[in-house]
Amino acid sequence: NRQRDFSIEGCWQGGARRRVVTLKAKCCAVCKCLALPPQRIYYLSLEFYMGRTLQNTMVNLGLQNACDEAIYQLGLDLEELEEIEEDAGLGNGGLGRLAACFLDSMATLGLAAYGYGIRYEFGIFNQKIVDGWQVEEADDWLRYGNPWEKARPEYMLPVHFYGRVDHTPEGVKWVDTQVVLAMPYDTPVPGYKNNTVNTMRLWSAKAPNDFNLQEFNVGDYIEAVLDRNLAENISRVLYPNDNFFEGKELRLKQEYFVVAATLQDIIRRFKSSKFGCRDPVRTCFETFPDKVAIQLNDTHPALSIPELMRILVDVEKVDWDKAWEITKRTCAYTNHTVLPEALERWPVSMFEKLLPRHLEIIYALNQMHLDRVAALYPGDIDRLRRMSVIEEGDCKRINMAHLCVIGSHAVNGVARIHSDIVKNSVFKDFYELEPEKFQNKTNGITPRRWLLLCNPGLADIIAEKIGEGFITDLSQLKKLLDFINNETFIRDVAKVKQENKLKFAAYLEEHYKVKINPSSMFDVQVKRIHEYKRQLLNCLHAITLYNRIRSDPSKSFVPRTIMIGGKAAPGYHMAKMIIKLITSIGEVINNDPYVGDRLKVIFLENYRVSLAEKVIPAADLSQQISTAGTEASGTGNMKFMVNGALTIGTMDGANVEMAEEADEENLFIFGMRVEDVEALDRQGYNAQEYYERLPELRQAIDQISSGFFSPRDPGCFRDVVNMLMYHDRFKVFADYEAYIKCQGQVDQLFMNPREWTKKVIRNIACSGKFSSDRTIMEYAQEIWGVEPSATKIPPPNLPRD
């Protein structure tokens, strides 16, 4: 047992804590200190999509029932209280929510882990639907304060921008910089009933008191004080783009801001650590990679690589090659997307102005890298061009993904199919160079929030059958396979689902004034609005169903409520048109007396974590219908699976592994595989061909383009139709026929509730792999070199041994 240095910053429990570590000691030649496996994990992310904290804290502390009872005694309703809390919406979607799940798992697994990010004053915008269009509203989530955070002004740190580089005999100096202060705010991250509380530290930008007074001291004091806003704007607002790169200077400032503050903090903690060194203050960085693991959540914190090099070489005077070895052994990079428009490529000119020293370092690292490639592949100039961190062209750019790959000891994708694409196409040349670097870490979700908290009814009936072990070891859900034919269990699962549906229907009626049929199939697609996620395919199915009902109103149809929700990036025209199309289709279908309550199309406004917690437990069908090869993993798919919805989806992202775990016949899999998409690309995708061959598709497209769904503005959707017909990168029509057919099979099964529920139970039982606990266990063992511990720390009120 060794104590961690929480005493330095005050542990959330008010005392030092213990943790068992495997001692793989080796002697460090320089300072004779004991090199142990990495003691601390630093998860760097520009997004942490936390949602609400109250109920999650009660669940993880095992206090939910006690609080419920106490609040009830006061004549209050705990659920009403929970609804008052604002979501911490410091993320766009999957990437930010994954970071939040990972924090929960790291604490639950007893890892000494810290989440580092930005405390945005305004998180992801609130979405209002006005006349069927998305309108954005600022998310002033801190308006009434945030009880979960504690400001730590004593750990405030300076961050430098602009300036110039001096090469002096004493070494390199970055001078004449502009300083912004980074103020840390700490939020506790409790593990599940293990008395471990980790920290998420978010930085807020603050102007120094002499800001703009020192250089322009010409008497305009008022103006200088007002200019403090310019510095403080760095942490003002989250950029609302999901899977899209927008090369704005403020965004680059945000990326460097979080990296510079975090690395200073990491190094301060490393130097003052009481363990593994005989010097009063550590100056030897030999053991740094054994004490510190830095995980880069996508390329957004990529500047960690040149910044760590800058600190080691310029400040700590470590030899360049040694510094590079330390940097590579410390950093690891997670890739989240293969879409070219999402890859960060910053103009060299912007770096030159904002981060001149980092540009020099990147050039030097790139030169080393290219020298190595040239030595291994003599004369292969094209390979050098493809592998360079600097992209030549009209505007020279820095490819941040390439920087991450050369500066990390591990590179991972987030689902097996995605990791294969990463190796075989996106980073093919790099994989050939260093195959041992590349790994897969299939994403997961925390079963605390996404089962226990959001679906207590289901969690209860599961615990009744197999005990509570599944909460921290989700693979135990496999034991439910023994109950697939158990009539009581089948009835209980169906009953819980029906209760969740009734509850959600009541919520929709209260908040959105829409009345839905709770016995209809709840067919749900909730995720960011993006062409590659193909909400348009869903729309075409809704229109096709509508046309079938209209052409034969007396025929019996399986009633459906199609719910689509998600935000569109404010500057993404096509995504906003897709929302308008969904609302317009709903307007027509929901008001057609021939249809009645057999079909409804609902757009779920302002989809966010707290709404996901309500809709996912109520869903019957989960739509995961991206074009094969475009969705890196998806995590919503896993949430639906564990909550007893069946999946209709393509063989993309983690759907592939879900189908593998539960057997393909227990999901509704349709459409092209990655190979088919590639074959179609080679042959040339021609939408017209499908339009002419498939009468139902033609009818739907003609209705959209003729103004059937927009009678007041018949040309409203011409951009959508034009895209689908002439430049659809995601081949919606190519999967239409298979999708409609597959939806027919969904209808067939839904008419047999017993068989449907048996498939649901099989899905739940096979969802154990998709716990973020399993994902984090793999990161810990295969990337960070630490062993998670199941040891429960004694609570602070008990005496220590």
Image (cartoon, rainbow, N blue to C red):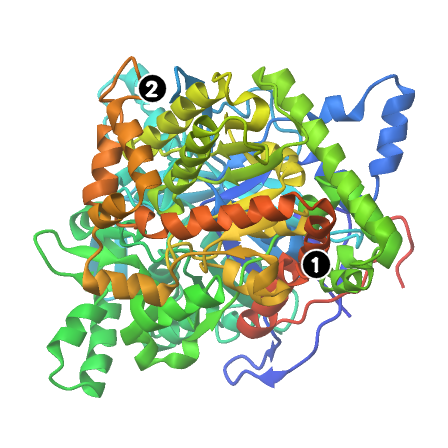
Q: Is residue 261 visible?
A: no
15 vs 271, left or right, is right
Which one is in front, 146 or 484?
484
Instruction: Report x, y in % for residue 773.
Output: 66, 60
Q: Residue at x 75, y 53 (%)?
A: 196
**Residue pointed to by mark 1:** 762
Q: Quadrant of the N terminus?
A: bottom right
Instruction: Report x, y in % for residue 300.
Output: 38, 51
Q: Residue at x 26, y 40 (%)?
A: 249
The mark lying in front, picked from 2 and 1, is: 1
Q: Badges 2 and 1: C-beta atoms under 8 Å apart?
A: no
Instruction: Report x, y in % for residue 257.
Output: 39, 45
Which one is in front, 655 or 343?
655
Q: Given the image, on which type of amino acid does mark 2 rest?
A: Leu
Q: Residues within 10 Å of mark 1 (few under 14, many from 20)?
A: many
Which one is in front, 303 or 35?
303
Q: Which numbered tag is attached to residue 226? A: 2
Q: Residue at x 12, y 60 (%)?
A: 392
